[in-house]
């Protein structure tokens, strides 16, 4: 491939040396394999390779996610670099008119520097040819995606002269059904360490850990991204605790109760405007302060919720109403209270779950106090790092690229794992909310039907139908059905010929 620089004298030796220096792993592997072949004989090497392949394949079959995390990603990146991207790069670049010409008439070609591969996205780092700007790539993104048989493509500037091209290879959530969390029977069935609210991109159950790791959770996502579904799914997992009185919900829904008024009977306290929200927040802090004091005197800390020491869950939809957009006095009063709620009540089972459209520092000054942050579809690329942390978008958390027809999909940064994980929460419909309310408010300790059952003792709350959020979700369902089922291998392993 032509270099983007002009006037570099090329000799075969120099080129070879450069190749070795640039691709130490690939050349290293070849050298190691060959020396092993010379030393132990090619049959032995072939046999060892066979064993390695069998081991790898079994690993993949047994546990694809861990295989992917430790080996698959690297293998795939390497494989796709040489067999797909590098091999086709020059042809594609010429075909899409992504070359420039210098004063001597030399054609300058942008250079493929490296390929990184995540389960859903491939990311190519490119050095621009002289005379190019990222917009040149933006204009032909559709063509690039088609050429590499990707579902979508995106470009972003890494630093002057260097861009990343991202190609989406698959969309696992198109076909995946995310089941609603089941309503457990008894309070001890609830595992606070793994509250399963949805599925990850590999189809595994995805759980939140309110016991210790995910103490407080911040959800970022623009309107319609599906923040509500995450919150409701979480409430659903807590249902048996709520019914037994082992958990209490303090809910602030400043947008006039749009999201949560249907669940009112579940809530210990409920506020549907900022002013009441502030009062609720103050009461929450006061209550937990008192509990803390009592427990401190008693000399013990709690680990499991009980009727005496319930899990105290504070839920705030549209956090910005209390931290940025509310009237000055409310914002000023709310901030220290929130910070306190986020830092002091771990031992007394205080948990805060908040949602915001803009996860930036000005809107949510205390976002750093949320140990777990989750990025649903965000309005701009810059929000992604603000929400998930520095460098997460580069690691593949393209939350701003989550398609609008996939609400409820989010990127999650889990402890002990560098790469972000794509997760979709289950969707709780109005009927499911009504069912949840019936389940939690029925005092009948006997077997409670898991399915909607009109004979349950409690009457459905009057509000549920009156204030039912009138968002039309049939729209996305139809769209879902429209999605053409393409066998994965036909478009993932972008092989050969671009005619
Ligand atoms: N997890 C999900 N699965 C399927 N559809 C969803 C999911 N979450 C949300 N939706 C759809 O998207 C719409 C908007 O979601 P909502 O939770 O109200 O978004 P937000 O609270 O972020 O504005 C919902 O009415 C529903 O139709
Ligand atoms: Mg909402």
Image (cartoon, helix red, strand yellow):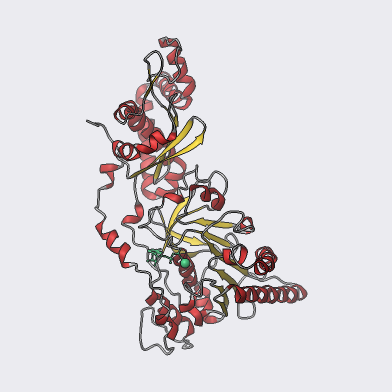
Residue 19 in sight here: yes
Image quarter of the N terminus: top left
Placement of 65 over or under 211, stated as above or below: above
In this view of the protein, which residue sits in the foreground, 63 or 233?
233
Q: Quadrant of residue 109?
A: top left
In this view of the protein, which residue sits in the foreground, 317 or 26?
317
Residue 86 horizontal side relative to residue 415, left or right: left
Q: Quadrant of residue 177?
A: bottom left
Image quarter of the C terminus: top left
Q: Position of residue 64 (x, y in %)?
A: 39, 48
Q: Position of residue 480 (x, y in %)?
A: 29, 59
Residue 318 horizontal side relative to residue 85, left or right: right
Placement of 406 over or under 133, stated as above or below: below
Which residue ends up furthest to the left in the rendered image?
499
Q: Position of residue 492 (x, y in %)?
A: 31, 42
Q: Position of residue 303 (x, y in %)?
A: 63, 69
Residue 168 in sight here: no
């Amino acid at each position: 491939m032509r270099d983007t620089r002009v006037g570099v004298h090329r000799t075969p030796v120099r080129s070879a040396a450069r190749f070795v220096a640039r691709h130490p792993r690939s050349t290293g592997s070849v050298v190691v394999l060959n020396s092993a072949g010379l030393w132990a004989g090619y049959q032995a090497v072939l046999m060892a390779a066979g064993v390695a392949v069998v081991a790898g394949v079994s690993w993949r079959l047994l546990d694809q996610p861990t295989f992917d995390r430790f080996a698959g990603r690297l293998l795939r990146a390497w494989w796709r670099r040489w067999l797909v991207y590098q091999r086709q790069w020059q042809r594609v670049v010429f075909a899409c008119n992504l070359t420039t010409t210098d004063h001597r008439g030399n054609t300058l070609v942008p250079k493929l520097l490296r390929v990184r591969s995540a389960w859903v996205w491939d990311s190519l780092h490119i050095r621009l040819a002289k005379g190019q700007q990222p917009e040149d790539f933006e204009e032909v993104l559709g063509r690039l995606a088609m050429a590499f048989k990707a579902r979508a493509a995106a470009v972003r500037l890494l630093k002057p002269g260097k861009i990343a091209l991202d190609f989406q290879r698959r969309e696992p959530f198109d076909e995946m059904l995310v089941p609603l969390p089941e309503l457990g029977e008894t309070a001890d069935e609830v595992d606070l360490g793994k509250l399963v609210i949805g599925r990850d991109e590999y189809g595994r159950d995805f759980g939140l850990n309110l016991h210790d790791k995910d103490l407080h959770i911040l959800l970022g996502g623009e309107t319609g991204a599906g923040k509500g579904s995450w919150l409701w799914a979480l409430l659903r997992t807590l249902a048996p605790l709520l019914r037994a009185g082992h958990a209490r919900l303090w809910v602030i829904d400043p947008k006039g109760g749009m999201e949560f008024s249907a669940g009112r009977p579940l809530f210990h306290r409920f506020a549907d405007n900022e002013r009441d929200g502030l009062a609720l927040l103050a009461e929450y802090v006061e209550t937990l302060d008192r509990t803390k004091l009592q427990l401190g005197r008693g000399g013990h800390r709690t680990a499991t919720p009980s009727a005496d020491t319930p899990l105290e869950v504070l839920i705030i939809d549209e956090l910005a109403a209390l931290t940025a957009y509310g009237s000055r006095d409310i914002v000023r009063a709310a901030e220290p209270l929130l910070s306190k709620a986020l830092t002091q009540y771990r031992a007394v089972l205080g948990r805060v779950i908040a949602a915001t459209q803009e996860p930036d520092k000005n809107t949510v000054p205390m976002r750093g106090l949320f140990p777990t942050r989750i990025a649903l579809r965000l309005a701009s690329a810059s929000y992604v790092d603000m929400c998930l942390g520095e460098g997460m978008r580069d690691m593949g958390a393209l939350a701003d690229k989550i398609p609008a027809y996939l609400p409820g999909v989010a990127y999650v940064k889990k402890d002990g794992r560098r790469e972000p994980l794509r997760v979709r929460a289950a969707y709780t419909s109005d009927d499911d909310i009504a069912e949840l309310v019936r389940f939690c408010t029925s005092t009948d300790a006997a077997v409670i039907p898991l399915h909607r059952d009109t004979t349950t003792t409690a009457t459905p709350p009057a509000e549920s139908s009156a204030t039912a959020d009138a968002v039309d979700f049939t729209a996305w369902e139809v769209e879902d059905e429209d999605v053409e089922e393409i066998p994965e291998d036909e478009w993932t392993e972008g092989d050969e010929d671009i005619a």
